[in-house]
Amino acid sequence: MSASLALFGILGALLVGAVSPGPSFVLVSRIAATASRRDGLCAAMGMGLGGAMFATLALLGLATVLLRIEWLYLVLRSLAVTRRRAARSALLANEQSRRVRGFRCRGPNERHS
């Protein structure tokens, strides 16, 4: 097998992975559908900036840096936990506010009553 054929195979696999929706797409779609357009755009911008930051840190050798500077690892980890908790509480608050208004989204397996 030639090197160019192997390269095109790898690029094809990467392309399929890049165009398929992932959890970030689902989160942004859910926020945009349940909240305002502004909230959806903010979520999309946050995902884009987070992805760019992740790629930049990966290129700079984050693993090596975090192995040498333990306090930086602990700070980044606590920020991630805080962000996850804030996102979860915002989604729960949104769900509760919809229930208070008398509207509840049904899952795909739930029947209309």
Image: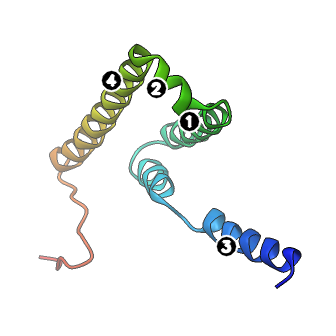
Dot 2 corresponds to which residue? 67
Q: Amino acid at mark 3?
A: Ala
Give the position of the N terminus as an image quadrant.
bottom right
Label whose residue precedes the other's in the sequence (4 or 3): 3
Which class describes the residues within 10 Å of circle 4: few (<14), some (14-19), or many (20+)? few
Please give the label number shown on residue 13.
3
Residue plotted at (65% across, 62% down): 18
Q: Position of residue 105 (x, y in %)?
A: 25, 62
The answer for how far apart the CA atoms under marks 3 and 1 are is: 23 Å
Q: Nearer the viewer, residue 5 or 20?
A: 5
Dot 4 corresponds to which residue? 78
Label whose residue precedes the other's in the sequence (4 or 1): 1
Is 55 displayed left or right of 50 in the figure?
Answer: right
The answer for how far apart the CA atoms under marks 4 and 1 are is: 16 Å
The answer for how far apart the CA atoms under marks 4 and 3 are is: 34 Å
Q: Amino acid at mark 1?
A: Gly
Secondary structure at badge 2 equals helix
Q: Amino acid at mark 2?
A: Leu
State which quadrant residue 26 falls in.
Answer: bottom left
Label whose residue precedes the other's in the sequence (3 or 2): 3
Dot 1 corresponds to which residue? 50
